[in-house]
Image: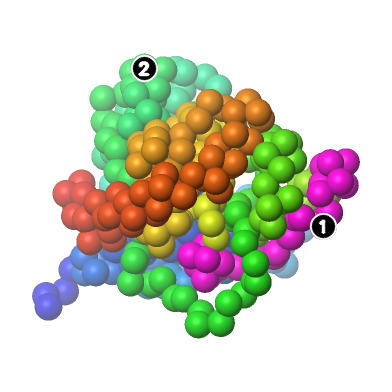
């Protein structure tokens, strides 16, 4: 294989427990297979996922700095690292809503090729408030990459950018590892991801689970993840008197044995991007019930084919959907049969070709 002189830095907040972080991990393996020298640069010292290539951990490198100077020091360290290693392309995977910080980042990146990834329909996470400066920051990027078509459309409408493209999040089916031992006895439904009430809306999930009464039929709700809102979740469980029917498990970078054995998984988010948890669930043959939030679920779930896609913020409707997948055996078996093949187009190989078409 001929040596590729292209050196790409994937810059992320961390390689921790979120969907954007999991995407960064997968992207590093995709780029390595394209014979690109990969440099993973993370702002905070959290590494849960495997990665291909080299790692520059700014969180560790700046650890001795005084708190006030830590962010400044990270900027200097990043600038030095990019120059020292001859990086000629940057894939920016971070939230980017702080205008002064992004002006500095634009200066640090310089004339290198730049691709910016947007993971959420909530554009205030990835763009400064000023439409004028947002356009100025990104109009000359090689591409602004949205993980769903709905995100790309709102970016084009809001910021009048012409350099947008949609590339869905992939899943590496070859990395699925299933334990032979059953981790949990009995029937259960499942959520796995970040414990963030503001985005994931656990209040809706738990209210619907309570109204469905499927726990009286022996079904438990398993919540797997980590985040700052665990206490809020526990308060809702206590309020609804569901303590005996809801189990909370810590974050697991390999949750697939739990997902595969779940009756179905559930997503109740107020907004999303392109939820990898849905892709992973379907890939394992597990149907999904999801609210029709902006964005992602409607691009993955065909209602009544591989799961149920329902109105958002309506706990009785969600409760009815839970009850339907438990009681309607024919519907459930049909959705389960179609689940894995419905996401075959999101294989790492397919998505890798789309990335290859826009790089260099």
Q: Please give the residue where the numbered disc 1 appears in the rendered image.
A: 244
Q: Please give the residue where the numbered disc 2 appears in the rendered image.
A: 157
In front here: 202 or 31? 202
Q: For marks 2 and 1, give the CA distance.
A: 48 Å
Residue 82 visible within the image: no
Percent x, y for residue 236?
Answer: 82, 42
The segment highlighted magenta reads: 235-261
Question: Which label sits in the foreground, 2 or 1?
Answer: 1
Q: Quadrant of residue 10?
A: bottom left
In front here: 139 or 122? 122
Percent x, y for residue 269?
Answer: 58, 37
Residue 253 visible within the image: yes
Q: Is residue 31 magenta?
A: no
User: Which callout, 2 or 1, points at the residue further toward the start of the chain?
Assistant: 2
Residue at the spot x=38%, y=72% of the render?
175
Residue at the spot x=52%, y=19% of the render?
130
Residue extending furthest toward the left: 2
In front here: 269 or 316? 316
Say if 269 sits above or below 189 in the image: above
Q: Is residue 243 magenta?
A: yes
Within-10-Å neighbours for mark 1: few <14, some 14–19, many 20+: few
Say if 325 sits above or below 151 in the image: below
């Amino acid at each position: 294989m001929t040596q590729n002189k292209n050196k790409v830095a994937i810059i992320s907040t961390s390689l921790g427990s979120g969907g954007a972080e999991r995407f960064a991990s997968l992207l590093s393996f995709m780029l390595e297979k394209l014979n690109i020298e990969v440099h993973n640069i993370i702002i905070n010292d959290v590494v849960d996922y495997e990665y291909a290539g080299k790692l520059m951990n700014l969180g560790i490198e700046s650890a001795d700095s005084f708190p006030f100077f830590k962010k400044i020091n990270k900027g200097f360290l990043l600038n030095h690292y990019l120059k020292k290693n001859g990086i000629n392309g940057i894939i920016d995977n971070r939230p980017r809503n702080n205008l002064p910080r992004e002006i500095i980042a634009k200066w640090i990146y310089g004339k290198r090729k730049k691709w910016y990834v947007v993971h959420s329909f909530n554009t205030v996470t990835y763009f400064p408030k000023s439409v004028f400066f947002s356009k100025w920051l990104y109009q000359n990027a090689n591409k602004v990459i949205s993980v769903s078509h709905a995100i790309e459309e709102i970016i084009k409408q809001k910021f009048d950018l012409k350099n947008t493209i949609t590339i869905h999040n992939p899943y590496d089916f070859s990395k699925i590892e299933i334990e032979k031992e059953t981790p949990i006895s009995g029937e259960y439904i499942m959520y796995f991801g970040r414990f963030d009430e503001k985005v994931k809306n656990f209040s809706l999930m738990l209210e619907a689970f309570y109204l469905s009464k499927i726990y009286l039929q022996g079904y438990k709700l398993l919540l797997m993840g980590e985040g700052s809102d665990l206490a809020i979740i526990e308060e809702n469980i206590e309020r609804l008197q569901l303590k005996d029917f809801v189990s909370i498990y810590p974050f697991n970078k390999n949750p697939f044995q739990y997902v595969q054995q779940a009756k179905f998984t559930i997503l109740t988010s107020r907004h999303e991007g392109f939820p990898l948890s849905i892709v992973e669930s379907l890939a394992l043959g597990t149907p999904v019930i999801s609210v029709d939030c902006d964005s992602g679920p409607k691009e993955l779930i065909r209602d009544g084919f591989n799961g149920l896609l329902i109105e958002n913020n309506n706990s009785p409707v969600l409760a009815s959907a839970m009850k339907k997948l438990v009681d309607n055996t024919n519907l459930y078996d049909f959705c389960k049969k179609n689940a894995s093949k419905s996401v075959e187009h999101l294989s790492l190989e397919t998505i890798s070709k789309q990335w290859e078409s826009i790089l260099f």
